[in-house]
Amino acid sequence: MQKEHNLSKNQKIIFDLIDKSGGPMKAYSILFNVQKKGIKAPLQVYRALDKLVEIGKIHKIESRNAFIACQNSSCQISKATAFSICESCENVSEISNTKLSKYLSNFADSSGMKYSKYNLEFFGLCKKCKSK
Amino acid sequence: MQKEHNLSKNQKIIFDLIDKSGGPMKAYSILFNVQKKGIKAPLQVYRALDKLVEIGKIHKIESRNAFIACQNSSCQISKATAFSICESCENVSEISNTKLSKYLSNFADSSGMKYSKYNLEFFGLCKKCKSK
DNA sequence: CTTATAAATGTTATATTATTACATAACGTT
DNA sequence: AACGTTATGTAATAATATAACATTTATAAG
Ligand SMILES: [Zn+2]
Ligand SMILES: [Zn+2]
Ligand SMILES: [Zn+2]
Ligand SMILES: [Zn+2]
């Protein structure tokens, strides 16, 4: 059972925008798009983004400084994320692969470090771009 | 046999600094440290960093916007990288694990995408920070 | 050695991404 | 109502990264 988070006004506006876009969005692009809705300052955007990341509704694509709506419905918090990124068209999608996530969640090495979180980004060419 | 790259003057200054630091360094911290050696502008630093990343002498820690010297001696180009990051002390080390790298390099999913590169960042508490 | 080409450098300005600091308002609980 | 927590508004600024252009140095042919 997934905990229901009642998004605040700004959080909802920004989540809906990212979700509808279907892909990754950058903070200042989000800002431009929500100015007509009264969100005028970067900080308002970053605060909403921080919260949305915290509760797992969106994830940050670190290599792109961009944010994407969670496509898994299962990511309550962003502690195990994997993405595939096309280096040509910059299309991004979230990888949902049980074997992979199990493998990584259970990963341990000799360092004595306890891993509580990971983020994995795969790069390559998507089907479309490969055939061009 | 590893291809020998003759680093240029700026590349050598900047690589030596990062390497000696033993940990991740940020671009503007690098800049500050090499100003006495005549490197005065951000672009000079970023150009050297770009090249060093390209030839695999350093890697970028995307979640931290920082650069670390390759600790593997085997990363000719940065196409398969994995790091462990302590969220308390921000200590970073490169993971060298044959099984892991084989698993990820061979990873394929149903998307039809051909992966040529990946970057993985594990987060947690290092031994030291755990025992505090 | 000269010419051509690619790689690296120097410099200024600017773009992009993200946070600090402080004041106020709304929400959820008792 | 009173309290603590979360969210908002606003201005200023910090931190990260790139564009544009001129010049120099290294590498390789001919
Ligand atoms: Zn997700
Ligand atoms: Zn593509
Ligand atoms: Zn390496
Ligand atoms: Zn630590």
Image (spheres, coloured by chain):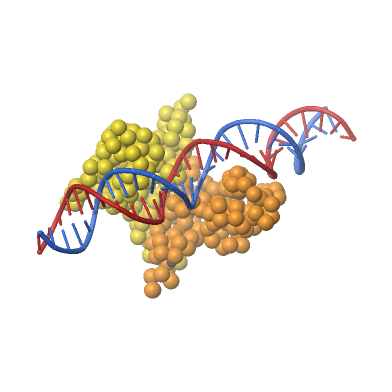
Chain colours: A yellow, B orange, C red, D blue
Q: Nearer the viewer, residue A102 or D26?
A: D26
Asked if residue B51 can be seen in this view, the reply is no
Q: Quadrant of residue D5?
A: bottom left
Question: Quick check: A61 above or below B72?
Answer: above
- Residue B89: give x, y in percent of width and height: 44, 65
The quarter of the rendering in which ligand 4 is drawn is: bottom left
In the rendered structure, the answer to whether residue A13 lies left or right of residue D2 reads: right
User: How many numbered dots are placed on residues in this image?
Assistant: 0
The residue located at (47%, 63%) in the rendering is: B91
Q: Quadrant of residue A39?
A: top left
Question: Quick check: C14 above or below B63?
Answer: above
The residue located at (50%, 60%) in the rendering is: B93
- Residue B63: give x, y in percent of width and height: 44, 51
Q: Nearer the viewer, residue C27 or B49?
A: C27
The residue located at (52%, 50%) in the rendering is: B60
In the rendered structure, the answer to whether residue A26 lies left or right of residue C27 reads: right
Asked if residue B23 can be seen in this view, the reply is yes
- Residue B116: give x, y in percent of width and height: 49, 41
